[in-house]
Amino acid sequence: MQKIFKPAVFMACLIPFIVITYQIFFNKLGAEPVKEVTHHTGNWTLRFILISLAMTPLRNITNSLVWTRYRRMFGLFAFFYASLHLLTYVGLDYRFNLDPIFDDVLNKKYIFIGFAAWLLMIPLTITSNQWMVKILKQNWKKLHRLSYLIGIFAVLHFIWLSKTIFFEPLIYLIILIILLVFRLNFLKLMFKKSPVN
Amino acid sequence: MKLNKFKSSEITPEKVYKNRRKFLKDMGIVTGTALLSQNIMSSALSYTPETERKITDYKYATTYNNYYEFGTGKSDPHKNSQDFITKPWEITIDGEVEKKITLSVDEIINMFPSEERVYRFRCVEGWSMVIPWLGFPLNKLLNKAQPTSKAKYVKFTSVFDPEQMKGQRFPVLDWPYKEGLRIDEAMHPLTLMVTGLYGKELPNQNGAPLRLIVPWKYGFKSAKAIVNISFVEKMPTSSWMKASPHEYGFYSNVNPNVAHPRWSQATERVIGENVFAPRIQTLMFNGYGDEVASLYDGMDLRKNY
């Protein structure tokens, strides 16, 4: 089952990439194509971050380990789309002209925090393999709690770039809060249990 | 609103229209369309016509809009405004005036002949279009009301109709939409009261039946579907100033040297270009500096953003 299912999920995760590639090369992006590519890759980054953060709560709720088998894949796809998002901004939009980019990173808080989120994803990507899990032991878990911070940064990035009160960023914020609250509850349970152990 | 004077058969098909524009441009002649000649003022052009950049596709100018009354997405205005009723429509001019007046849009169109103005249109979000507007200088309308010496600013109020404008059912902005100009800006010959575009009547999504165009300012200053113009003594607070005072100032002149907290204003994307097209440099006062820079002599445009 897993042997069929995992490649299928992998292919499904590639669909947003295939869609945008098709739209770029067949000129289907409308009036402001660069903005479309930026928004598409940004949206999917955020979605994959939230999907990967949903796996542990789903495991706890359903009491099934199947969810966590996909956590790494979703996390890596989040990094993949985040990198495309960054590349769109740096390459397609600003044509690797670094002056205005540095200026943006330092002066625009939404770009600063978005860039910070991408940087934080790098150590998680590097340590995502089984070998690193073994080397880092307990530290691996601590390190990968950075994903909560990445989620917060990514949602803030979206909220701060929005012009006024928009629904979309608020929906992402609500989902993120729910996913993080799950963790608080389980932390509390763990603290309660620990003296017994 | 309807351009009653012309039968629909007299309206030039867009393709012919574009070719004619190109022909005129190639000949070095840029004037109002011949189509409307009987209704166009014969006065010499009082602005620098756009000759370098190509006119934006009609499709994009009428489907890619910011008009939050009809929704916050760029395609929402086109989608949600098609049934918007713009007839009858009245506009009142009041405040510090000798003579408060109320006019219907039909009266206004008959009173002031339209001329075509091809202007660059720069959105604060960092994109731009080039649009052939039909309209007349706002000062002609304003002078009818005879502003008094107390009139220092002009406040524009757009229509409030949440029944028809579903965006107004949400507190996205302080409805109705309000904008303002200093009186010398409002009286400037470049400032246009717009009734049409591309030789056609103004589509609902572009602010029908009557909108403002102030080409040297960011697009949001050019209020749409205006119902009231009021002369006031104190600087009015626009809806965007109220929403976010540190981002949107009263003047909002196009200025590549003053960045917006979210968008660099040094460059802009040209609407309708392909995905690999580069940004272009944004011009001071959107390229209308020769005409309008003197309005701001001695002002710190960094503070008065």
Image (cartoon, grey):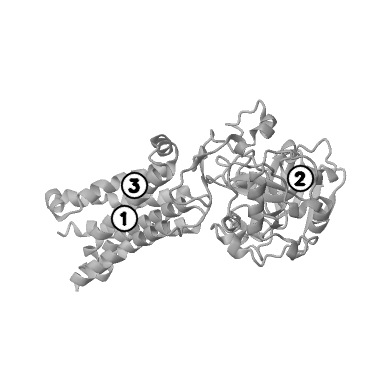
Of badges 3 and 2, the one in the foreground is: 2
The local secondary structure at tag 2 comes to helix
Q: Which residue is mark 3?
A: A117
Locate the N terminus of chain B and report the quarter of the image it occupies.
bottom right
Q: Are marks 3 and 2 on the same chain?
A: no
Among numbered discs 3 and 1, the one appearing first in the sequence: 1
Q: Where does residue A154 sit, x and y in percent of width and height?
A: 38, 50
How far across and down, in percent of the image, does residue A196 sit? 16, 60
- Locate residue B218 relative to residue B36 in the image: left or right: left
Residue A191, placed above or below residue B299: below
Residue found farthest to the front = B27
Quarter the C terminus of chain B occupies: top right
In the foreground, B153 or B115? B115
Q: Please, what secondary structure does the residue beneath circle 1 have?
A: helix
Mark 1 residue type: Ala
Query: What label does residue B138 carry, if any?
Result: 2
The total number of labels drawn is 3
Q: Amino acid at mark 2?
A: Leu
Which SS class for mark 3? helix
Q: Nearer the viewer, mark 1 or mark 2?
A: 2
Q: Is residue B102 visible?
A: yes
Task: Name the disc covering residue A78, or none.
Answer: 1
Q: Give neighbour class at mark 3: few <14, some 14-19, many 20+ (Cα, 10 Å).
A: many
